[in-house]
Image: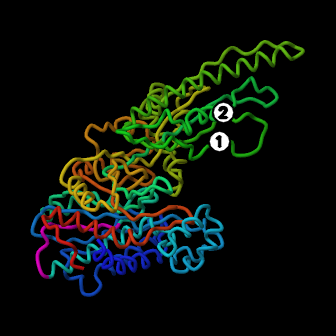
Amino acid sequence: MGREQSAWFAPTRDYALRLVGIRGVSPSAAENDVAREVLRILGEDGLESTFTALGLDTIEGDQYERANVYAILRGASPRTVVLLGHIDTVPTTDYGALEEYALDPLALHERRDALAEITPGLAEEIARYGDELFFGRGTVDMKAGVAANLAVMRALAERSRDEALPLSVVLLATPDEENESAGVLWAVRFLLRLREEYGLEYVGAINTDYTTPLSPDDPHHYVFTGTIGKLLPSFLVIGKESHVGDPFDGVDADLLAAELIADLSMNPDLCDVVRGQKAPPPVTLHAADLKVGYDVQLPFAAYFYLNVLTLSSSPGELLARLGERAQATLDRTLERIYGAEERWARLSAENTPPHARRVGRVMTFAQLHEAAEARLGAEAVERSLSALATTLAETLDKRERSLRLTQQLWTLSALTGPAVVVYYSPPYYPHVQATSGSLLETMSAVAASHPGLQLLIREFYPYISDMSYLRLDPGMDLTALKANMPLWSDDFPPASGGYSLPFEEIRRLGLPMINLGPYGWGAHQRGERLLQSYSFGVLPQLILEVIERLGGHEEPAAH
């Protein structure tokens, strides 16, 4: 691959430098600055006129008026490959004193020793790879991947001046992947419109998000044929109020929440395992009690939410599993509190008898809703929740908004604690298993033709990505998600403050996918870096070879 690799290197690296140099932290209007640069790169050197269509597609109702960048090359065949990548990044404050250089890979290269001083393990990599490393926010995640797509798309546009391409290609560069994937969710509808307007037949999508070795000595470069999913189960924990001078008259909600977190967080028993791949364990992303200031009352309400990554569990299956564990933990903790009160009572001079054993309940949001409706009627409950929703600021975090609505429903139910209410907060990313077909077969053939690259095909991309919204696994049951998410709306886009996903459109789109991306380390860390030879030289050639084989052509790139 030597000749082809050297031909790709300079333009792909230049595109990456240009994109990384523009701040596009999500969510913000600045993402459009990156989008406009993508559009400029595509149209440079007179290539604009070669595209069947080229432009920005604004996301309807987006508060920042962000847009997806698209480019279409209609070939001789309606069979179509989609090149996908996101243009947004996380912030740069983690760079500390080097933050002013975070978007300048050349300046960071000059300061790599200073970067190594604050980045564990980086000095060893610098000694191993030297000038091969390319530093900066967004380099691997994932502006180098977008740069590779741009290089390939421009090469295909050049070729289309002389001959019709054997198949059609669509490029999409999307904002907001690091937040709530507004870009790709809007792109689902856009791709369906293109399919109708141009008579396209989608073969699949090549996503170019980053890949990384599994260990320092791992020799492989990875290709993925599906993606991991994510659910955010949330827990409203209700105790019982009391003065701290009489703690056993109440129940400390923080204690209950702590015991639940201890059982659920980092627990490998809750990990999905599919065909030899295992999802990482759940972790607690946020936990707090609901006191707003200092006093000497026991905290009688708390909440937390878990990040749960999935390979096979549906929302209903996970909800049932968490409910069973939560009930067992609640029972065990209440029994321990009773035992502690018995021991304390024996120590006191009054020999006060303990309170009766407490019984706690675990219920889902849907069950709580039923209890409130049984007490007040469906219309009264809906009026109360709607009235509360209108008072909440549009900018209020969706996790906080979900909590407020669940609290209100608890009040309406007139139930008493101890109790735990389990519900879902946004966002939701469906897992997607591998899809057999021409895209997977072609990628396997390309990988086999380059044994020296040690390309290893695995099923589940291990990080949250926009690929979750390109297709839904057959039989995926979403009933429990909709019934137990306080913000769920059947409309897409949802009204302000709501949350929805275009499930029907995603099913209709049904894109097979692979992830073939740049190779690097440290995404979302100040040591973010990539390996230039693979990311700028090898990667675009591999993408082109997949496209050519799908179109029936196997000759090397004429670049």
Camera-nearest residue between 249 and 328: 328
Q: Earlier in the sequence, mark 2 or mark 1?
A: 2
Label 1 Cα crowd, 10 Å radius (few <14 / some 14-19 / many 20+): some
In the displayed structure, 115 sits above or below 412; it is below
Residues marked 2 and 1 touching at CB (< 8 Å) = yes
In the displayed structure, 78 sits above or below 281; it is below
Mark 2, mark 1: which one is toward the viewer? 2
Residue 93 lies, in percent from the top left, at 60, 67
Marks 2 and 1, how far apart in space? 9 Å
Residue 162 figure quarter? bottom left
The extreme right residue here reads: 349
The quadrant of the picture occupied by the N terminus is: bottom left
Say left or right for 369 vs 149. right
The extreme front residue here reads: 452
In the displayed structure, 257 sits above or below 426; it is above
Label 2 Cα crowd, 10 Å radius (few <14 / some 14-19 / many 20+): many
Residue 549 lies, in percent from the top left, at 17, 63
Question: Residue drawn 49% across and 31% down?
Answer: 322
Under circle 1, the secondary element is loop
The type of residue carrying mark 2 is Ala
Which region shows up in magenta?
162-173
Under circle 2, the secondary element is helix
Question: Residue drawn 30% across and 59% down?
Answer: 451
Residue 544 lies, in percent from the top left, at 24, 68
Q: Which residue is mark 2?
A: 253
Q: Which residue is mark 1?
A: 290
